[in-house]
Each structure stands twice: as C-alpha cells, then as structure tokens.
Amino acid sequence: MAKKETLRSFNDVLSILGSQRFDVAPAQEGAKRTPNAFQVRKYGCAAEIAAASDGSVQILSRPGWLLGGEISRLLDRGYQKFLKTSRLEIPATADHLRAIHEFSEELKEAAGSTSLYNESLGTTSDVYQYDRVKGRE
C-alpha cells in the first residue's frame, strides 16, 4: 500500500531547516526574483526556495555548490563532472559531490518532497555534455 504523504507548510519547513542547522536567509540579488524567496545553505551548498501557491515549498534553484556567492550547476562531460557558474568553472571533487548529495537529500526530507530512487543512489547532474557527440544532432 502506498504511503500517504502530508504536505508541510512553508513556515513549517523553514523552522525544520533552522532546527537542522541550515543557514536560512532571504535570497540575494542574483536570485530568480520571486517574492519572499529564501536561500538555504549547509555543507558549502545552497538552494533557493519559496512558498508555492498552495502553501507548500517550491524549490526555485536546484541545490549546488557555492562558488563566489553564486549557486553552481553540476555539468557532466562524460569523463569529469564540473561545477559551473556564470563566471567560473572548476572540476568537481568527490567531496563536492558528496556534499551536494547530502544537502539535496536533507532538503527533500525537510520539505517532505519525494525522494527518487536514482537520485538517492548519488548525485545527478543538471547538464550532460559529452565531447564525442558535440556538434551532432
């Protein structure tokens, strides 16, 4: 039998995140301009959340490592994963990937979101760019 999920309110999620030692602060200038957006940080990673129209939590930007105050995206080029922002790109280390994975799982658990099997196994990338297929359709 399927487990019945209860949606947590945005304020409940903010208090849960605060009690789990997440840094919760209003989103900064570079954020997607949603009213009352918050940036949550832990383990050197961050994500932006806001209240959805039904009162639950909406994740505005996927969790990523903080580089120069900006949330990076995880880029997979087949042979290596990279952390990429609008100004910087660096190779991702195993420590970066572990931190992003742990941060993502804790954020989903606090928000009451569904944790998917493939995402629970490890870190999934935001973008996949393989050099062998670059330029091909």
Image (cartoon, rainbow, N blue to C red):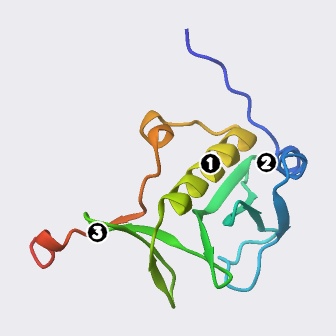
3 is higher (above) or lower (below) than 120:
above
Q: Residues within 10 Å of mark 2 (few under 14, many from 20)?
A: few
- How far, Cα to Cα, is label 2 from label 3? 38 Å
Q: Secondary structure at mark 3?
A: loop
Q: Secondary structure at mark 2?
A: loop
Q: Quadrant of the C terminus?
A: bottom left
Q: Looking at numbered disc 2 in the image, what kind of residue is underneath it?
A: Gly
Mark 2 vs mark 3: give the one in front: 3
**CB of mark 1 within 8 Å of CB of mark 3?**
no
Residue wearing tag 3:
77
Residue wearing tag 1:
102
Which residue is rendered at x = 21% and y = 68% of the image? 130
Q: Looking at numbered disc 3 in the image, what kind of residue is underneath it?
A: Arg
Residue wearing tag 2:
55
Question: Where does residue 61 sit, x and y in percent of width and height?
Answer: 60, 65
Q: Which residue is situated farthest in the bottom direction here?
A: 87
On screen, residue 58 versus residue 78, left or right, reads right
Question: Where does residue 110 sit, x and y in percent of width and height?
Answer: 75, 42
The residue lying toward the viewer, choosing from 85 and 112, is 85
Question: Where does residue 52 sit, x and y in percent of width and height?
Answer: 72, 54
Q: Secondary structure at mark 1?
A: helix
**CB of mark 1 within 8 Å of CB of mark 2?**
no
